[in-house]
Amino acid sequence: MSADADSTRPALLLAEFETPDQIVSAAERVRKAGYEKWDVHTPYPVHGMDAAMGLPDSRLGWIVLASALLGLLAAVGMMQWMNGYDYPLVIGGKPPEAYASMVPVMFELTVLLGAFGATFGMLALNRIPRHHHPVFHSERFEACSNDKFFLSIEADDKQFDPQATRAFLERLEPSHLELIEEAA
Amino acid sequence: MTADHPISEIGEAPLLPAHITPARVSEQVTSVTERPARLGWWLYFGSSLLLFGVLGASVSYLFWEGIGVWGNNSPVAWAWDITNFVWWIGIGHAGTLISAILFLFRQRWRTSINRFAEAMTLFAVICALLFPLIHVGRPWHIYYTLPIPNQMGVWPNFKSPLLWDVFAVGTYFTVSLLFWYVGLLPDLATARDRARSLFRKRVYGFAALGWRGSHRHWRHYERAYLILAALSTPLVLSVHSVVSFDFATSVIPGWHTTIFPPYFVAGAVFSGFAMVMTLMLIARQVFDLEELITLQHLELMNKILLVTGSMVGFAYATEFFVAMSSDNPYERYAFINRATGPYWWAYCIMVTCNVLSPQLFWFRRLRTSVPVMFAVSILVNVGMWFERFVIIVTSLHRDYLPSAWGYFRPTLVDIGCFVGSLGLFFTLFALFLRWVPQVAMFEVKAILPGAQPGHRPQHPDEPRPAPSAVPQPGRQHPEHGDLPAEAVLEPKEA
């Protein structure tokens, strides 16, 4: 997207690649060059990319563990308070607060809150929904959800230099390279 | 979402032919939502809508008159309503099995069919939820089952299996919806990026939540998908177990058996696979998806039908054997009456459809014949409906004293509610086929030959050609399985 030079500033450099092998080796080179604010965009998860980008393991599991345990506690607390304390019901001669028959609901609420944790935790870690991002300014980026592989280095990165970074990316032999600008 | 290679030594071939490229997958799947619907879709949608109208009419009449217009009587207080509930829930289970359990077992062939199956789960659970709601007779009081404060100051009884059902089915629906939507995100982004009209861009764009294929996102995304699969697996097993508790915790001969939870789960998977089969064969025909849903996929599904059908047959035999050796005259009578009493015909249909018809799949010719598998899938759907009917109605219709014996006959409203629920299901399914990417595109792309990087280190200055540009005619033939795995799978160096 081109606009007046004084109202825009560079947002990121976007390099396009054709094959998964190219994008993985390009990602390795970018990581070794010491860039920090950069990303890879692929139509499907590419194996070996975590290592190539030097990404740590996802923390999502801990979020799910916490929310699942919360579900379990909520279920126990709810049933104990309702059937055992607030309005004790004697059913089939069992003690009102008997645990055994409460197991199915405990299980279901554990799973339910765990699933909420997995879904909404994933969205939160990824900072989506986010409908505006500089990569969407590229007309070629539409192919990312089809069959092309992209690598972006953000202008906010400490090492970013319009000329040097561009030259660096050109050495990776992308099939296309463009500067994306955003409103200043 | 895994790239495990097919094992050529045992004759496994790549799942999809070599000429399928990622772009072709996007085109084939998304274009269904882009071009005007075919006549076949309109016929399917129109007739479904008509049946849905039958549901509206039947349920309106039922609410107006009360459930006395059903054939339910004393002693048969549970009849078609609960039969339909259990049947629909069971159908839903195959969707979760395909999306979650086969995912955990790394069965890559699931990628072509999991979206279908998950959608089927959602719609089947919606149909299932309808029946307890209308069965209570006063549906405006259904909130009594929820733990919310009410004017009576009393809380729900958490020792009741019917209440467990509320939580199990409610959780099942919610988790299935989340799982389905999470799986859809990248494909909605594809639909957004291909959209030409502003309206489509806005709608699919809104639904895609701004997905941009970032690998920093894929990392959390894949973990979320794995965890949802891991949560859904015990969930799906628990749901039909809890449904079976509705029966097993009672003291009715024929219901009070410990075999019920596994027996119900096996039956659920069996009936669900049959329903996936029915729907898929129709959609494959109407939308020309033969390239993505190949005969190999269908054959694998038929093998699962054979296995689960045999498990169900084994459960029937076990149940009968245990009743006969129980030394309990009521239990024995319930089973002898089931097979030889006034409902002998229902028992015969059940055994013929569920146990005998899948045995045809021992033969490769039959299991790869589309007309045969379509017929068997319909038979299994019918048979599993009768299984629920046999369990529920034959156990109830002869109470302990002959003075309390009865016979259940469905009324027109019973039939209208059941047939109408099929209409609801097929209407939702028709809308799904038309507007939502019906095959998980990103998962299929990830398992295409050459979709994942080779393991050899490669100099970045020597880019490889796109894998799809290298034609390898021998790749799709299992006869060429004697080539080393690398040669079959990896794109050749240029």
Image (cartoon, rainbow, N blue to C red):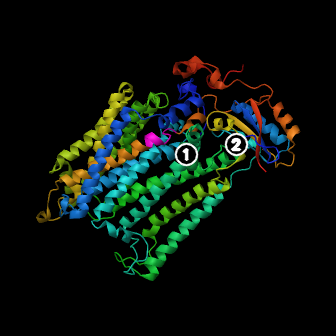
Residues rendered magenta in the picture: B432-439
Q: Could you tell me which chain the residue with mark 2 belongs to?
A: A
Residue type at mark 1 is Tyr
Q: Could you tell me which chain the residue with mark 1 belongs to?
A: B
Q: Which residue is mark 2?
A: A137
- Residue drawn 21% across and 43% down? B348
| Whether residue B140 is situated above or below residue A45 in the rendered picture | below
Residue B165 lies left or right of residue B104; in this view the side is left
User: Looking at the image, can residue B79 be seen?
Assistant: yes
- Residue drawn 30% across and 53% down? B84
- Residue drawn 36% across and 37% down? B42
Badge 1: how crowded within 10 Å, few (<14), some, or many (20+)? many
When asked about the image quadrant of residue A21, the answer is top right
Can you give x and y, in whole percent of width and height, for residue B433 in the image? 44, 40
Magenta stretch holds residue B409: no
Q: CA distance from mark 2 to mark 1?
A: 17 Å
Per the image, label 1 sits on a secondary structure element best described as helix
Looking at the rendered image, the quarter that the C terminus of chain B falls into is top right
Residue sitting nearer the eye, B8 or B491: B491
Residue B17 lies left or right of residue B335; in this view the side is right
| Whether residue B196 is situated above or below residue B77 in the rendered picture | above
The mark total stands at 2
Cβ–Cβ below 8 Å for labels 2 and 1? no
Can you give x and y, in whole percent of width and height, for residue B292 in the image? 49, 31
Can you give x and y, in whole percent of width and height, for residue B268 in the image? 38, 48
Q: Which residue is mark 1?
A: B204
Can you give x and y, in whole percent of width and height, for residue A136 in the image? 68, 43
Residue B75 lies left or right of residue B125; in this view the side is left
Per the image, label 2 sits on a secondary structure element best described as helix
Badge 2: how crowded within 10 Å, few (<14), some, or many (20+)? some
